[in-house]
Amino acid sequence: MLASGRTLAPVEVAYETYGRLDDDGGNAVVVCHALTGDARAAGEGGWWRTMVGPGLPVDTDRYFVVSSNLLGGCRGTTGPSSTDPRTGRPYGPDFPLLTLGDLVAVQRRLLAHLGVARLHAAVGGSLGGMQVLQWVIDDPGFIDRAVVVAASSRLSAENIAFSAVGREAITSDPDWHGGRYLEHGTLPRTGLRVARMAAHITYVAAQTLEGKFGRTRRADGPPSLEPDFEVEHYLRHQGEGFVERFDALTYVYLTRMLDYVDPFADPRTAEALRRTRTRFQLTSFDSDWRFDTAQSLRLLEQLRALGVRAEHAELSSPHGHDSFLLTPPGYLDRVRAFLTDPS
């Protein structure tokens, strides 16, 4: 049962687990992925292989780690491109609108299926960090530690605007067909590519693009209307690779869901957080302008005002929002210390 009142069934969930659950069940950790992630968090091809694995902060020799693809996704979990059992065709735009709570509800059901009764920690960056916050709100006694990296309790107007541009690119593509492109045997490839190109600019810092590409051109010659500068080719490469692994409707649905996230506007949030014993670690990066430090500080203030134990640090990194996927100085050690602190 979704927050909207609609029922979605059946729901399939793609997930991976790493490590072994202790006999007392006290070593389980959930890893929550960002907007375009999937269940493969660790190992070859893992989207968070800097964080999750043997000897890493989310140590799979120590913890039982669960990572799943989100509801509404396109990497194995039920989403808009899945088959609607009522019609035998893809859901397409008939797929219900989702809330962050809907995503977390599916993850909680997955943990129950796996026999996990409580969590040592939930860890996530960006949208993943927002899921971690929602976890604690929806089940205040379930999680001991919450690691929230490069995230926010609600999107800024600028963030909503960037997402709107991406959705407009997708829905304006002639192959969109009102979201029923799969029934037409097409894909809005150009729109999705442009959406990813625009979004990718917001994930990296200006100094990263300047240092890597500057004004370098692919070839000498007169000005041209075709891609000429190396940064243009880089963004096109990012967009083309994204089209091969991601679904346009999933992008539209999840970005739209994010626009409406604002848990502290709900009075039930304060009631839940006043009861929680979860400890929060918040981390932001000085070059991240998509989810800047001010947004983490607002969340810190909101949590502390309700008596929640929370700490924050801004770390230096040249990598912008993508820093949470990489290894800025002090970052991994900070998470490791929080997860292993016995207090």
Image (tube, rainbow, N blue to C red):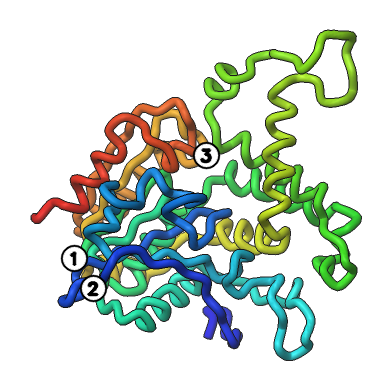
**Rendered image quadrant of residue 36:** bottom right
Name the spot of residue 136 as percent of width and height, x first: 32, 66
Q: Reading the chain from its start, which is encountered first: label 1 or label 3?
A: 1
Name the spot of residue 182 as percent of width and height, x first: 82, 69
Query: Left of 269 or right of it: where is 226?
Result: right
Q: Where does the C terminus fall, quadrant-wise?
A: bottom left
Instruction: Tell me whether the residue at label 2 lies in contact with that at label 3, contact meaning CB atoms closer than 8 angstroms.
Output: no
Report the residue marked by disc 3: 290
Q: Residue at x 23, y 53 (%)?
A: 304
Report the residue marked by disc 1: 277
Instruction: Tell me whether the residue at label 1 lies in contact with that at label 3, contact meaning CB atoms closer than 8 angstroms.
Output: no
User: What kind of residue is marked 1?
Assistant: Arg
* Secondary structure under the numbered disc 3 in the rendered image: loop
* Secondary structure under the numbered disc 2 in the rendered image: loop
User: What kind of residue is marked 3?
Assistant: Arg
Instruction: Tell me whether the residue at label 2 lies in contact with that at label 1, contact meaning CB atoms closer than 8 angstroms.
Output: yes
- Furthest residue in direction bottom, as rendered: 86
Q: Residue at x 48, y 32 (%)?
A: 320
